[in-house]
Image (spheres, grey):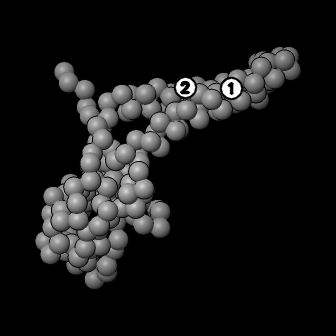
């Protein structure tokens, strides 16, 4: 069975690589030091510092494994230009259900950041799937509960990725 390819912008890919390096170079060594210090305190059965360090190390190892999987199975998606919505674009839309204009970044698999100043959604989300490959002026139905429509007002390259 073929592996899933995670579509990422170059910036998102670079962030994953940097996070993996930080885990290996800084976080894991620091956590191992904490573990050794806690181990040296004696009785491990009631040593909360030891348990916390072991838990932290297990979480870091799991994240490292997840990052390796994502990095090894990623596909860098090139910017498609300002004429069509794609991964790495920032769009302004008119939401018909709220009568608001919103600015939204379309990211790859790692792109969801719904609470940032500029909302970022993954291309795999209902919103991302609906607007991909559409143009300025298109009205698109978002298959959510409840369904709603947005009209694409503008498309531009997201500056997060333009700097790469």
For the N terminus, the quadrant is top left
The part of the image, by quadrant, that contains residue 56 is top right
Tell me how far mark 1 sits from mark 2, CA to CA: 12 Å
Q: Residue at x 26, y 53 (%)?
A: 79
Q: Residue furthest bottom?
A: 99
Q: Residue at x 71, y 30 (%)?
A: 30
Q: Which residue is mark 1?
A: 29
| SS category of the residue bearing label 1 | helix
Examine the rendered structure and indicate whether residue 36 appears above or below residue 155: above
- Residue 120 % position (x, y): 38, 59
Examine the rendered structure and indicate whether residue 33 appears above or below residue 83: above
Q: Please tell me which residue lies in front, 156 or 44.
A: 156
Q: Please tell me which residue lies in front, 53 or 84.
A: 84
| SS category of the residue bearing label 2 | helix
Looking at the image, residue 63 sits to the left or right of residue 123; the answer is right
Q: Which residue is mark 2?
A: 61
- Residue 108 % position (x, y): 32, 48
Residue 113 appears in view? yes
Using a 10 Å C-alpha cutoff, classify the residue at mark 1 as few (fewer than 14 neighbours), some (14 to 19) or many (20 or more). Answer: few
Q: Residue at x 25, y 31 (%)?
A: 4
> Which mark is first along the chain, 2 or 1?
1
Q: Residue at x 18, y 62 (%)?
A: 84
């Amino acid at each position: 069975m073929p592996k899933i390819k995670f579509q990422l912008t170059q910036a998102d890919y670079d962030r994953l690589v940097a996070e993996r390096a930080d885990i290996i170079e800084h976080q894991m060594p620091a956590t191992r030091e904490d573990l050794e210090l806690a181990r040296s305190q004696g009785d491990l059965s009631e040593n909360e510092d030891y348990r916390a360090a072991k838990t932290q190390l297990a979480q870091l190892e799991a994240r490292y494994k997840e990052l390796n999987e994502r990095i090894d199975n990623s596909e860098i998606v090139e910017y498609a230009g300002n004429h069509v919505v794609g991964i790495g674009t920032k769009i302004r839309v008119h939401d018909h259900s709220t009568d608001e204009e919103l600015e939204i970044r379309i990211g790859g698999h790692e792109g969801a950041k719904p609470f940032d100043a500029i909302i970022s959604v993954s291309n795999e989300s209902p919103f991302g799937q609906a607007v991909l490959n559409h143009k300025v002026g298109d009205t698109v139905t978002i298959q959510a509960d409840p369904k709603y429509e947005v009209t694409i007002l503008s498309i531009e390259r997201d500056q997060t990725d333009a700097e790469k």
